[in-house]
Image (cartoon, grey):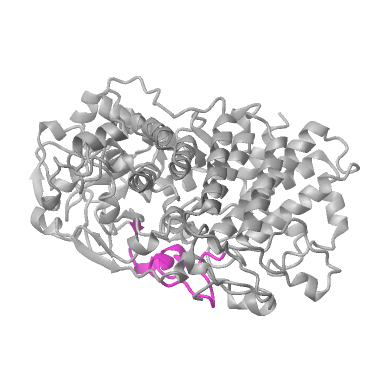
């Protein structure tokens, strides 16, 4: 039963208080000087229990995944998972003031008081340097043979491995936000001179090599599988460390960091180039992609018990509905075989339920239509993101020879053939019809159906009107009264809601049923697509397509070559490196939608300037009737400044405290 302690402590918010017991120096001291508080450290590392408590706190520096309370923006204000790019939006009203991630999407990032500031720990984000400091303390103390003598060598090595994994994770958060960062392998003693404290930024290549080696070091000490996954969920395994290494190396090989002319003249105060100076497509560029491909292969080989998740639901349902459940449960079903590593979230019912209800339409699942005045549907999916999902033929809708792309915004009454996804006899946009299963697994919209586990077989589902979404003005799930907030765009996120979620009475904010789940930070489909991306860049297109097709098959799609040859206006697209690259990028956009991946992907691909310099659009949710509702409206005109906005600014405050730092370009 000893193993339960770490997982339980991670789940408890009060565990983080232990950090402050020996955190006497501010998080802005460069870089997190080790506290001169030996008495407290002696106490912390005196017994197995207190040392284990401290290990648990190392996990709590991860950025938050919860939604907060029901009456305000709550913890969503620090959630870069959804609102920092172009795929999701929210309403202004009382949510603006502290909604830091949304302000980034609105183009309000700044260097005076940076938003989602992981460097200093301001404006909706923990300080990653503080997390690194605490990892260093733990590693240093646990490497002393006289510390916690009751902890044996196997457990001691495992605990240090976990700390090294988290230390690499916190560095990676900083790296993909800021690029070249100061490596903090050991903490700086309090006795250091001011000049020793004023560290410099390491180069991108130095950071990447350090992190890759640190992941290898962590992996060597971590178990291949969790000895008891039911009570150790959330703790790192070897495959998690190697998956992190793969993500780091794919990021480093991507266009933002590899052969990027925008940063070729970016140097520090000593004239050192902080970014690689190699050109796109040269030998060094290829070597970085080969290194990334090798890391992905190594990570996959380290996961003997992992495979893509297919639902174990035994109800009588059609294949298409089963394919949709595959994707939903791959993300929300705890302990499933696809998840490599989860970030433990708050299991308390209020936090869990509020998280999910903020994704869904109001007055859902039998709540009376007259109920109004409640804030719901905090996260809206943009029309542009809805269009990124494929047609039912598994190709982009603008490429599909059989898809009426030109008239996609016009309406049509759903027939019997659409009834599994759209209520028969309901008028909805053609855009919502004849789409792939991941579209219906990920999104809800006016006219859609939503499957919950309680319906059992498909007949019960189709005959239950509570499965229907009616989201136009004055309808059950639509705008009722001037104070009710619904989706800003007409699209809602379904994918992040457990299939076991259900309202229980007439109050939308009352207790809801269902199972809570932890946030899957790493899952196998993500790793497969990273591997495919790296393979394509080193010329192994056939093997890349094999891994893409594994992911597509789970959602009922034919293989890439078959789909493009039969349905696309660009049948040769998978046969070229550039064409397959575009396919892989869109596969990641679709498969990993709303999982916190897109904001980082479109930046490392240098595609954010393409996607985030467009009008954010949605349906006219206050429109009365079909014709008024289904009118695309501009919600916001995004502006993404290149190259400035690809990297976070370091705060002016930090630059003044440490004159050896240099600001990121454009800030």
- Magenta region, residue range: 88-117
Q: Does 601 appear above or below 583?
A: below
Q: Nearer the viewer, residue 627 or 521?
A: 521
User: What secondary structure is the magenta-colored segment mainly?
Assistant: loop
Q: Residue at x 68, y 49 (%)?
A: 57
Horizontal and vertical percent position of residue 383? 25, 55
Q: Residue furthest front?
A: 283
Work out whether residue 377 can be spotted.
yes
Q: In this view, does 292 lie to the left or right of 101?
A: right
Q: Which of 415 and 667 is in front in this view?
A: 667
Q: Is residue 500 magenta?
A: no
Q: Does 34 appear above or below 352?
A: below
Q: Which of 6 and 634 is in front in this view?
A: 634
Which corner quadrant holds the N terminus?
top right
Horizontal and vertical percent position of residue 209? 65, 51
Horizontal and vertical percent position of residue 146? 91, 43
- Residue 27 figure quarter: bottom right
């Amino acid at each position: 039963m000893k193993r339960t302690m770490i997982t339980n402590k991670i789940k408890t918010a009060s565990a983080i208080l232990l950090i402050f017991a020996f955190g006497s120096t501010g998080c802005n001291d460069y870089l997190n000087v080790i506290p001169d508080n030996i008495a407290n450290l002696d106490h912390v590392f005196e017994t197995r229990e207190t040392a284990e408590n401290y290990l648990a706190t190392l996990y709590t520096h991860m950025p938050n995944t919860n939604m907060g309370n029901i009456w305000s923006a709550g913890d969503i204000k620090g959630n870069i998972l959804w609102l920092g790019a172009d795929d999701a939006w929210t309403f202004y009203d009382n949510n603006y003031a502290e909604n830091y991630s949304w302000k980034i999407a609105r183009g309000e990032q700044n260097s005076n008081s940076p938003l989602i500031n992981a460097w200093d720990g301001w404006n909706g984000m923990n300080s990653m340097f503080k997390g690194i400091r605490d990892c260093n303390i733990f590693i240093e103390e646990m490497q002393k043979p006289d510390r916690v003598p009751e902890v044996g060598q196997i457990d001691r090595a495992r605990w240090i491995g976990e700390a090294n994994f988290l230390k690499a994770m916190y560095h990676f958060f900083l790296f993909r936000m800021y690029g070249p960062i100061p490596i903090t392998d050991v903490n700086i003693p309090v006795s250091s001179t001011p000049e020793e404290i004023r560290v410099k930024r390491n180069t991108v290549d130095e950071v990447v090599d350090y992190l890759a080696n640190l992941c290898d070091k962590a992996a060597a000490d971590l178990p291949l599988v969790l000895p008891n996954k039911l009570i150790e969920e959330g703790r790192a395994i070897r495959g998690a460390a190697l998956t992190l290494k793969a993500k780091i190396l794919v990021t480093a090989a991507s266009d933002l960091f590899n052969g990027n002319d925008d940063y070729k003249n970016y140097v520090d105060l000593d004239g050192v180039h902080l970014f690689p100076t190699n050109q796109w497509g040269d030998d060094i560029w290829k070597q970085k992609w080969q290194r990334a491909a090798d890391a992905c292969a190594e990570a996959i080989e380290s996961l003997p018990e992992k495979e893509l998740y297919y639902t174990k639901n035994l109800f009588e349902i059609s294949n298409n509905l089963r394919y949709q459940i595959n994707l939903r449960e791959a993300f929300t079903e705890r302990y499933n075989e696809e998840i490599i590593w989860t970030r433990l979230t708050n299991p308390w019912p209020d936090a869990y339920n509020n998280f999910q209800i903020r994704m869904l339409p109001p007055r859902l699942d039998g709540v009376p239509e007259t109920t109004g005045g409640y804030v719901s549907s905090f996260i809206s999916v943009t029309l542009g993101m809805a269009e990124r999902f494929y047609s039912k033929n598994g190709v982009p809708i603008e490429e599909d020879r059989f898809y009426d792309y030109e008239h996609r915004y016009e309406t049509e009454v759903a027939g019997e053939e659409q009834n599994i996804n759209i209520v028969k006899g309901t008028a909805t946009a053609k855009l919502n019809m004849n789409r792939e299963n991941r579209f219906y697994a990920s999104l809800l919209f006016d006219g859609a159906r939503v499957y919950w586990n309680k319906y059992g077989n498909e007949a019960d589902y189709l005959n239950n009107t509570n499965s229907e979404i009616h989201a136009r003005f004055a309808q059950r799930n639509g705008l009722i009264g001037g104070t009710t907030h619904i989706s800003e765009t007409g699209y809602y996120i379904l994918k992040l809601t457990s299939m076991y979620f259900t309202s229980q009475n007439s109050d939308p904010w009352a207790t809801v049923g269902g199972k809570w789940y932890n946030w899957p930070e790493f899952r196998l489909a993500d790793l497969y697509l990273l591997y495919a991306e790296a393979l394509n860049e080193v010329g192994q297109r056939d093997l890349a397509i094999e891994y893409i097709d594994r992911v597509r098959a789970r959602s009922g799609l034919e293989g890439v070559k078959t789909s493009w040859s039969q349905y696309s206006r660009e049948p040769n697209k998978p046969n070229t490196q550039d064409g397959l690259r575009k396919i892989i990028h869109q596969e990641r956009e679709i498969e990993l939608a709303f999982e916190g991946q897109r904001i980082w992907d479109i930046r490392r691909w240098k595609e954010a300037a393409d996607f985030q310099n467009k009008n954010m659009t949605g349906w006219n949710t206050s429109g009365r009737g079909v014709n008024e509702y289904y009118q695309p409206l501009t919600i916001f005109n995004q502006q993404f400044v290149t190259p400035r906005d690809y990297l976070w600014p370091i705060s002016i405050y930090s630059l003044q405290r440490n004159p050896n730092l240099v600001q990121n370009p454009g800030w």
